[in-house]
Amino acid sequence: MSVAWFGASRHKAALRDADRASPGSVPAATPAVSRTLMHPPAGTHDPNLDDGRPAALVRELYFDDVAGLHCAQGHLQILAAPDGLPSLCDAAATQLMRVRAFPVPEPRQSPAMCTYLVAYEGTADDLDAWVTHYTTHHTARMAHFPRIREIEVGTQLDWRHALSWAHVNRMLRNKVVFDDPSGLRAALNSPVRHDMRANDATCRKFTGPATHYPMHAAVVGRSHLAGGVAACQRRG
């Protein structure tokens, strides 16, 4: 189990074409990062939900532990600098979460994939019981999605941060990954999705909204950030 830092531009921001080609997506010298994902919006939709416009870009940076993130905070501040990504400057909300991967029948990873980012923004009457039910029953159903390549769940983690962006505290984030938008669409229209929605009725209650956004997912190296983002957008 590792930790992941999420940096999401607010939905009112727009990633300009010039910024898509910028190497400032993640500072090249950021230490301790074990994996970097870039999530621009995907050109598909959920047949059952419409949560409006997604973030212009979500960065997901993985670290082995919280100490690694603390070492990187000074470097991540560069993202808010005017010469970082100007169209997203000062337009982000961040969160650090403990993330856990769940098994899928046929895991496979390519440089650019399609993902479904879900965030639960509220609170539950019994958070521990709610999270346990979700990670036990919901993830087991997700594993039956056709052509699913990855399941990840992030849970709350307290941390002190020195970043200038707003800090949010979603009680849970979920990510399912597919090869391409057609794979995500097939999953969202499958009987598995209907089974999951029925299972929601048996889950402990929570208050607050949940957001669901189809996004691309580019696994990028620090020296290939711009190319990875461009590749996953072309696949939309």
Image (spheres, rainbow, N blue to C red):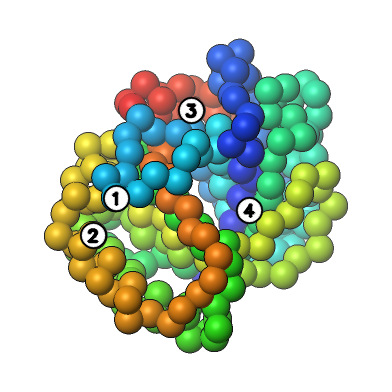
Q: Which residue is mark 4?
A: 5
Give the amino acid type for the residue marked by disc 1 in the picture. Answer: Asn
Between the C-alphas of marks 1 and 4, the distance is 29 Å
Between the C-alphas of marks 3 and 2, the distance is 28 Å
Q: Badges 1 and 2: C-beta atoms under 8 Å apart?
A: yes
Disc 2, SS: helix
Q: Earlier in the sequence, mark 1 or mark 2?
A: 1
Q: Nearer the viewer, mark 1 or mark 2?
A: 1
User: Residue 229's mark?
Assistant: 3
Q: Nearer the viewer, residue 138 or 99?
A: 138
Give the amino acid type for the residue marked by disc 4 in the picture. Answer: Trp
| Residue 105 shows in this picture | no
Give the amino acid type for the residue marked by disc 3 in the picture. Answer: Val
Q: Which residue is mark 2?
A: 193
Which quarter of the figure has residue 233? Answer: top left
Q: Position of residue 78 (x, y in %)?
A: 78, 34
Disc 3, SS: helix
Q: Which residue sits at x=74%, y=30%?
A: 89
Dot 2 surroundings within 10 Å: few (below 14), some, or many (20 or more)? some
Q: Earlier in the sequence, mark 2 or mark 4?
A: 4
Q: Which residue is mark 1?
A: 48
Horizontally, residue 74 falls left or right of residue 148, namely: right
Count every numbered label the image shows and give the total: 4
Between the C-alphas of marks 1 and 3, the distance is 27 Å
